[in-house]
Image: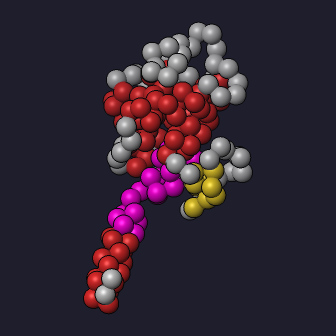
Amino acid sequence: MNVKTSAAAVAVALGLYLLMKLKSEKLPLGIRNNNPLNLREVGIPWNGKTGENGGFTTFETPHYGIRAAANNMKNSYLSGNTTIEKIISEWAPETENNTAAYIASVSQKTGIAATENITAMPQLVEIIKAMIYHENGQQPYGNALIERAVYDGALFGAALPDTFDISGGVYV
């Protein structure tokens, strides 16, 4: 390789690096952190956790971030937060969010009434997709990734009640 070719290769590589850096800096924090539901960093040793950024946990991959959020949401469900209204009221309190708008957005996107009890895993998958959109202004992940991560998170640890339908997913 001659000097001109080497210089051109370095210029192209530098240009690509700068373009990728610029593009990644424009992505929402939740997407950059692989934490699309914006879990706050509180010291939980989540699988795939890599640290924190801006007060939020960072993860190796979006799968780990969504899995942690689904596990957190399942635990909230087990403590009595069984509707979109109750889940989001705990997830996104009025002190930091327009909680009513968040609830309305997720309810509208999922077609699930805000006060309807969540009773099946496919509902939880749709709620998490809608929450990702609300948190980031976009939902860039494929259905298979989200479904796999939600099932992994919701089925890890404490069991859901027998009345909660875990069927309907590709991965069960």
* Residue 29 visible to an observer of this rendering: yes
Relative to the observer, which residue lies in front, 141 or 74? Answer: 141
Q: Give the image's coloring scheme.
A: secondary structure
55 vs 13, left or right, is: right
Q: Does the magenta stretch include residue 23?
A: yes
Q: Magenta region: which residues?
A: 20-40
Residue 33 place in picture, x, y as percent: 51, 55
Residue 156 place in picture, x, y as percent: 65, 28
Q: Does the magenta stretch include residue 81?
A: no
Residue 148 place in picture, x, y as percent: 49, 31
- Residue at the location (36% across, 78% down)? 14
Residue 78 place in picture, x, y as percent: 65, 23
- Up/down of 19 relative to 160, above or below: below
Return the residue found at the far front: 1
- Residue at the location (46% across, 57% down)? 32
Relative to the observer, which residue lies in front, 12 or 73? Answer: 12
105 vs 78, left or right, is: left
State the quadrant of the N terminus: bottom left
Return the residue found at the far top: 163
Q: In which quarter of the image is residue 93?
A: top right
Relative to the observer, which residue lies in front, 172 or 102? Answer: 172
- Residue at the location (40% across, 69% down)? 21
* Residue 119 visible to an observer of this rendering: no
- Up/down of 131 relative to 39, above or below: above
